[in-house]
Image (cartoon, rainbow, N blue to C red):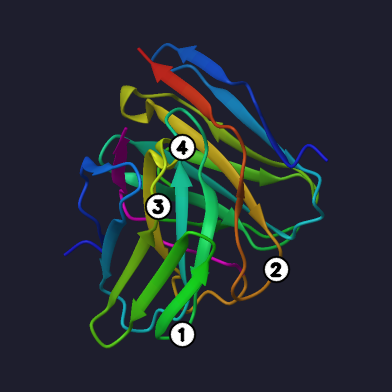
Amino acid sequence: NAGVTQTPKFQVLKTGQSMTLQCAQDMNHNSMYWYRQDPGMGLRLIYYSASEGTTDKGEVPNGYNVSRLNKREFSLRLESAAPSQTSVYFCASSRLGVELEQYFGPGTRLTVT
Amino acid sequence: QKEVEQNSGPLSVPEGAIASLNCTYSDRGSQSFFWYRQYSGKSPELIMSIYSNGDKEDGRFTAQLNKASQYVSLLIRDSQPSDSATYLCAPRKEGYSSASKIIFGSGTRLSIRP
């Protein structure tokens, strides 16, 4: 099993460009998440999807959109990238339930110039 | 007040000693608590979870929870250089039963010196 995979690993964008970060999991998990991690800020939740067909905003959703394409895949889109979106982005997944662990992908390091 | 507070460190501990990592949280309703370890340049991985007041031991790791004081800690016994990492405290955010939503602290950087 690959677990949680993310593409790309690195990306440089110019201000105003758009792009989609891809995430897939092969653990048959119901819930998927997108986080960003900035120095001194910890992990902040952008969007999450409790199950296929549903998505909800997290702590910092502005400037992002998501699509839960199917049970395996959850993508994050930046429509018009800004320098403030320079960060490391992590996708995670977990089984549906109350007290369960989250499994993280390797991350995407995004720089917006 | 931040929802989760951790000393950012770095916390320097000699090899073989006990490392003590502390965390306070603001949501009195939190029932589940997680400790994640993150090596530099890598993604977080779960190392401990605790749900009840008291201690929970797993190998060299012990998680301690005091809900009345809104305090959770992680002890690492016989610290090894491989324990050098950032440790993230993460209480579960209650009220979101449709998904396991947790709030991460900014982490404590631990350095084990030989």
Nearest the camera: B37 or A14?
Answer: B37
User: Circle 2 marks a residue in which chain?
Assistant: A
Q: Is residue A60 visible?
A: no
Tell me the amino acid under the disc marked 1: Ser
Give the SS element for disc 1.
loop
| Dot label at residue B82 | 4
Task: Decide: few, some or many residues near mark 3? Use Cα within 10 Å; few <14, some 14-19, many ≥20.
Answer: some
> Residue at coordinates 22% horizontally, 41% vertically from top-left?
B12
Q: Nearer the viewer, mark 4 or mark 1?
A: 4
Residue labelled with disc 3: B78
Q: CA distance from mark 2 to mark 3?
A: 36 Å
Q: Which residues are magenta?
A: B99-114
Task: Decide: few, some or many residues near mark 1? Use Cα within 10 Å; few <14, some 14-19, many ≥20.
Answer: some
User: Circle 1 marks a residue in which chain?
Assistant: B
| Dot label at residue A96 | 2
Residue labelled with disc 1: B52
Q: CA distance from mark 4 to mark 1?
A: 28 Å
Q: Nearer the viewer, mark 2 or mark 3?
A: 3
Q: Is residue A61 visible?
A: yes
Q: CA distance from mark 1 to mark 3?
A: 25 Å
Tell me the amino acid under the disc marked 2: Leu
